[in-house]
Amino acid sequence: MKNPERSAALARALAAQTEDLPKDFAKQVASLAEAEDKSSPWSWNDVGLLGAFVAMIGVCVAGWFTFGASESGTAEWFDPVIGTVTTQPWLVIGVVGIAIVQLMTFRRRATT
Amino acid sequence: MNQELDERARVRAVLDRQAGAFEALVRDYQKLCWHIVFRMARNPDDARDLCQETFLRVHRQLRQFRFECPLKSWIGRIAYSIALRHLERQRATPVTHFDEGEGELEALADASFDLETESGDEQTALRLREGVDALPAIPRTLVTLYHLEELSISEIATITGMSEGTIKSHLFRARLSLRDWLHRRGVSAP
C-alpha cells in the first residue's frame, strides 16, 4: 500500500485551531519538574508499602518462633536456615533486596 | 547521526540539571504533544493537564531513554499513551483498525477527491476543520500527525504502536470521511 498524499489544505485547516497551550507552559512545567526533583523520592505510599512488607516478614518469623518451632518438635530442618541467615547476612540482604525491587516494580507497573 | 549526538547532548544537559535545559526541551516538543493530546482528548483543559503530565513523565523517565528512536518519537509515544489512557478512563475506547480491504480504500480515496481544490475558500476550510473534529479520536490524531506535523508513517508507527498498514488505512479512510462530510454540506467534488 502506497503512502497517502499529504494535503496542504488539511494542514492549513488544522493549523488554524485557536486552542493552544499557555504561553508560559514550558516554564510552568520546568518549575514543577524542579519541585519534584527537590522533593523526597520516597512517597508516603512507598514507605507504607515497605513498612507493610517488613511487617509481613516479621509476623511470619514471629509466628514461626511462637508456634511452628514448638509444634514441629524438632527444628532440625530449620537450623541450617538459621545458620545461613547468621553466617551469610549478605545473602539475606540480597534476597530481601530483590523482593523489595520486585514489589516496587509491580507497584510502578500498576500505577503507570 | 548528528541528530542523535545533538539529542544525547540535550538529554545529558537535562539529566545534569543545567539551567533552562528542560524548559527548552519542553518548548521544542510542546507543539507535538499538544497536537497529539488535544486531538485525542478534545477538551482543551484536559489536554493542558495531559500535556503537563506528559512532560513530567518525560522528566522522570528521561534517564531510561536509550536513543533507540528519535527523542521526538519517544516523547510523542508518552503523550499518545497518556492520552489513550485518558480516553479509556472515559470509556471512549477508540477503534484501532478498519476491516475493509485496504487496496479498495486506497483507490477510492485517491481517485475521487482533491482536497486542495475542495478547500480553496475560507468557508470550505472551516467545514474541513469541522470534518476533522468529527472524526473518531485515533484517525483525527493520525491525520494531524501526518498532514500537520508531517511525520513519516514509520514515525507515527513508533509513536502509536500501530502497524504502518493500519495507519495508512486510517488515513485513507479519514480522507474518505472528509469527502463525505464536505459533500453532505453542499461542497461538490470537481
Image (cartoon, rainbow, N blue to C red):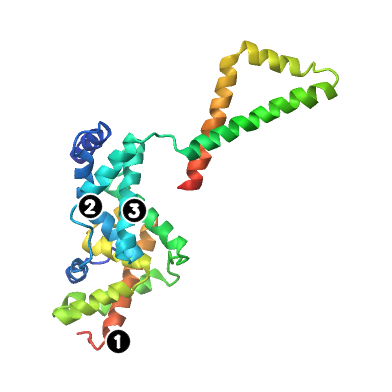
Q: Determine the CA span between mark 2 and mark 1.
A: 39 Å
- The amino acid sitting under disc 2 is Phe
Chain bearing mark 3: B
Q: Which residue is mark 3?
A: B79
Mark nearer the N terminus (1 vs 3)? 3
Q: Between residue B39 and residue B69, name the one nearer to us.
A: B39
Q: Position of residue B176 (x, y in %)?
A: 31, 76
Q: Which residue is mark 1?
A: B184
* Residue B70 visible, this orientation: no
Please tell me in which quadrant of the rendered image residue A3 appears. Answer: bottom left
Q: Determine the CA span between mark 2 and mark 3.
A: 15 Å
Q: Between residue B105 and residue B145, name the one nearer to us.
A: B145
Relative height, residue B44 to residue B19 (above, below) = below
Q: Determine the CA span between mark 1 and mark 3.
A: 34 Å
- The amino acid sitting under disc 3 is Ala
Relative height, residue B180 to residue A25 (above, below) = below
Residue at the (34%, 50%) spot, across then down:
B53
Of circles 2 and 3, which is in front? 2
Q: Mark 2 and mark 3 in contact? Answer it, CB < 8 Å.
A: no
Q: Is disc 3 on the same chain as disc 1?
A: yes
Q: Quadrant of the C terminus of chain B?
A: bottom left
Q: Mark 1 and mark 3 in contact? Answer it, CB < 8 Å.
A: no
Chain bearing mark 2: A
Q: Position of residue A72 (x, y in %)?
A: 84, 23
Please tell me in which quadrant of the rendered image residue A2 appears. Answer: bottom left
Helix, strand or loop at label 1? It is helix
Give the residue at the far bottom of this rendering: B186
Residue at the (45%, 64%) spot, across then down:
B90
Mark number, residue A25: 2
